[in-house]
Amino acid sequence: MTAPDNLHFLSAKELTHHYASGELSPVDVTKAVFERIESDGANYNAFCLIDPESALASARQSEQRWHRGEPCGLVDGIPTTIKDLVLTKGWPTLRGSRTTDPSGPWEEDAPSVDKLRKHGAVILGKTTTPEFGSKGVTENLLTGSTKNAWNTLRTSGGSSGGAGTAAARGYGVLHIGTDGAGSVRIPASFGGVFGLKPTFGRVPVFPPSPLGTVSHVGPVTRSVDDAARMMSVMTEPDERDWHALPYNACAYHEELEKSLDGITIAYSKDLGFADVDPQVASACQKAVKRFEEVGAQVEEIDGPLDEDPVWITDRLWFAAFLRITETLNEDQIALMDPLLIDMLERARAMNVFELLDAHRAREDMALKLCNVHRKYDLLVTPTMPITAFEAGPYNPWNSHKPEDWIRWSSFTYPFNLSQQPASSCPCGFDDDGLPVGLQIVGPKYADHLVLQGSKAFEKLAPFQLPP
């Protein structure tokens, strides 16, 4: 069997097959991915750091293990990237900010990085993020703007925009993202790739996010299989995270093929409050009906919310940015994105009772979302009400207002508040050839069911690669 030419687009499952047969080596693949980044990457700006020397050293170690027939884990030799909000030993985690001292020390891996590394992942570098992961596009004063994989005039989305573009363009196979209000699912939708925000606590986190119980670590990949493989690894226990769920030892990548026959799916076109672009609405309406082809029962519902919970997210985020900036002096704050400075000023004006009101309202809203699953196994919505808009600072629509940055992602942040697992699957394109995403949501703790639903949809409508 001849090794394929497009090594940079092979899945983890395909690569492990080729490694086991000896047709490919991790060194070959790692070199091919760096060649792809070198030839293609300047147009997209997905990385803030790459380290070929370190990656190739890891690839050579992996190659030796495969030659002995002793791979060390599920992702041995698989090219992987880490978002620049996630601690990575030996490399600076700048969080997209000029306020972070790059000299470190950088002596510790976050749990997700640690588990992937122990399973043999070849870590290529770190992907871009807006400053402190603060908005749904990926541009900052440190590294500039990350572009959409389908159209360089459009945004990648964010805050895991570097991960989304890297996945779509073939700059690695596995990509760690984070999601505090949609930051995995937004770039997945805009970039035509798969993204999963797991149940809160399913993937251990350290250090704790300033966003607290709305922030999640999750995979961004070109396929559901690759994301499930990442989940099988990243959900392994880590005692540093006191919020982590008990380890369930789930082999997510082995449970994808279960039938959806008889599964009940609720489809909400607007969650009860969102405005949706007609082309997005049409693509998602057609996509959700396809689940009936595999025996699922699909029913359109009203609601389940009766108002936009964005004000809850605003207050939780304002409190988080007080925490992020509490050790910064005024000279450092002056180096920050003007949007963040505005957010900080608003946060300083907030009182504790406003924050407590937000927490109480969050509980009520989350209960409404969770109650959907008393009747339905899955809830499906558009991931985003729009497709990718023009790249550049102070978009959408050239606004400095923090609230304008969250309102156009109305389908994502409610599920950060409720802590439910939610994925984004590519489901079509608008008239400009830009991807549309379909969001699949499960009850808390049912990450396996969300992945199974996502895999079923991927088989019905295989995901496409950008030109």
Image (cartoon, rainbow, N blue to C red):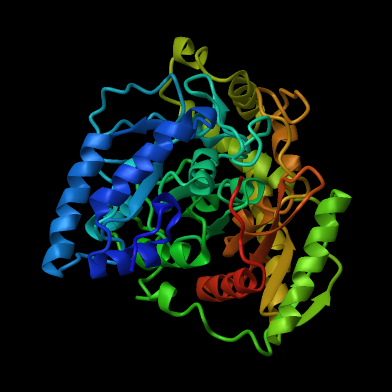
Q: Quadrant of the image for the C terminus?
A: top right
Left or right of 322: which side holds 343? Answer: right
Left or right of 54: which side holds 2? Answer: right
Judged from this view, the residue extending furthest toward the top is 331
Left or right of 156: which side holds 227? Answer: left
**Residue closer to the observer: 353 or 219:** 219
Reply above or below: 411 against 83: below
Judged from this view, the residue extending furthest toward the bottom is 262
The number of callouts visible is 0
Q: Quadrant of residue 297?
A: bottom right
Please state the horizontal and vertical placement of residue 416, each as a whole percent of the image: 60, 54
Q: Quadrant of residue 262?
A: bottom right
Q: Quadrant of residue 265?
A: bottom right
Q: Is residue 128 visible?
A: no
Which residue corresponds to the image point at 67% horizontal and 74% vertical from the top-left?
Answer: 378
Q: Quadrant of the image for the N terminus?
A: bottom left
**Residue closer to the observer: 231 or 271:** 231
Please state the horizontal and vertical placement of residue 449, each as a whole percent of the image: 56, 76
Please state the horizontal and vertical placement of residue 276, each as a whole percent of the image: 84, 50
Which residue corresponds to the image point at 85% horizontal and 54% vertical from the top-left?
Answer: 273
**Residue closer to the observer: 207 or 227:** 227
